Amino acid sequence: MLINSIFFINHSGDIFLEKHWRAIVSRSVCDSFFDAQSKANSPDDIPPVISAGKSYLISIYREKIYLVAACHMEVQPLFVIEFMHRVMDTFTEYFEECTENAIKDNIIIVYQLLEEMLDNGFPLATELNILTELIKPPTIINKAVSIVTGKEGVSSVLPGSQLSNVPWRRQGVKYTNNEAYFDCVEDIDAIIDANGGVVSAEIHGNINCNVHLSGMPDLSMSFVNPRILDDVSFHPCVRLKRWEMEKVLSFVPPDGNFVLMSYHISAQNQVAIPVYVRAMISFKDNQGKVDITVGPKQTLGKTVDSVVITIPMPKEVSGVSMTTSVGIYSFDPISKVLKWDIGKILPLKIPTLRGTCTLPADSKCRDSHPTIHVDFRIMQLAVSGLKVNRLDMYNENYKPFKGVKYITKAGNFQVRT
């Protein structure tokens, strides 16, 4: 993989940071990306790979920031995309957030990290524990020492783990409280038709880990029903052969936060839709009517919370008048977006939204059918049915604190009207 340059572009289309390897690449190479951005309705509609003359532009969008990599040779796009996501994850760990202001406030450390993570266009050190030994995170003490001594925060000693068989874990780790927590987070992408039928549904899941264990522990995690996982990817610490033979995750964990496994379930018979939305939106003459009901469906008794309904209304709509049984609503007269913040759905009080929209006399939006976007969260539920059976630790004598948490969230969840 060879990356010549990476450009950081904010939501307004301004390049606020750029890093070059081998040779400086002109900013004009991003013109093809800006053309695609102007034609797209949302950041998700921008093609991830764009041909720009002699270069290929590969981009991702996170935290209202576009990362655009310019490559002069043919490369595997997924490698570049994965590397740029690793860059954003590293910035988040260093600065607690990966926003434009956070990057600008720590511009020196950003350039130091990019220099270590990519050597002459090729990935070098991408593991967080190696980077934190090489480049100290921007704490108040580290900043004060740098100002007083005038020294950069880059270590002159090569981290021992970089030459180890397990480069993702630093050596000599010791904790007073040894703990390992695992979050099984599943995002549901679904399209529901006007009659409540499922047009498409799939689950994207991650097992996020927060591990603080002393020494060099060896963990194994087994599942009650691992056969439902038909498309998986692992952190490099996972022993692939044992998974293929026994469907058991065996690994020496990195220290701190990391994603152990990602999986994708596309079989619709395995995707349970946890909420229902009954919507009737019609436009006639100079008025529109809205009637929406939301409720839990297949949640196994778990509470649905953080529910938000978003409806992009036709441009002709000048105002709305609504009443809600639960939550509050708002309407943006500029973007024409009706937003209903429900919060938690209680079993004895089903949320409803009813009201009218104001239209001009010569409105032409009678045949308009807005698509409803639904956001929600369900704690202690993995909608796929995935469940951890047991977690064992070897190679160390102490007994750590262990915990597994399940979270189901809405990804791109749409309801047609």
Image: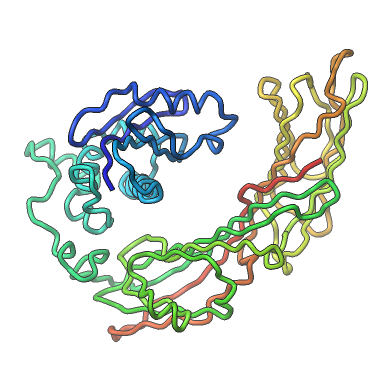
Question: From what the image shows, is residue 253 above or below residue 32?
Answer: below
The image quarter in which residue 188 lies: bottom right
Q: Position of residue 250 (x, y in %)?
A: 38, 78
Q: Nearer the viewer, residue 57 or 342?
A: 57
Q: Position of residue 276 (x, y in %)?
A: 79, 54
Q: Nearer the viewer, residue 147 or 136?
A: 136
Q: Nearer the viewer, residue 47 or 239?
A: 47
Q: Position of residue 315 (x, y in %)?
A: 74, 21
Name the residue rendered at 48%, 73% in the picture: 403
Q: Position of residue 74 (x, y in %)?
A: 33, 43
The image quarter in which residue 18 lies: top left
Q: Nearer the viewer, residue 146 or 200?
A: 200
Question: From what the image shows, is residue 323 above or below residue 254?
Answer: above
Name the residue rendered at 73%, 38% in the picture: 340
Name the residue rendered at 41%, 33% in the picture: 51
The image quarter in which residue 169 lies: bottom left
Q: How many marks?
A: 0
Along the horizontal axis of the image, is 338 left or right of 196?
left
Point out the residue furthest to the right here.
285
Along the horizontal axis of the image, is 392 left or right of 27?
right
Q: How is the image coloured?
A: rainbow
Along the horizontal axis of the image, is 278 left or right of 49?
right
Which part of the image, by quadrant, shows the C terminus?
top right
Name the residue rendered at 71%, 45% in the picture: 414
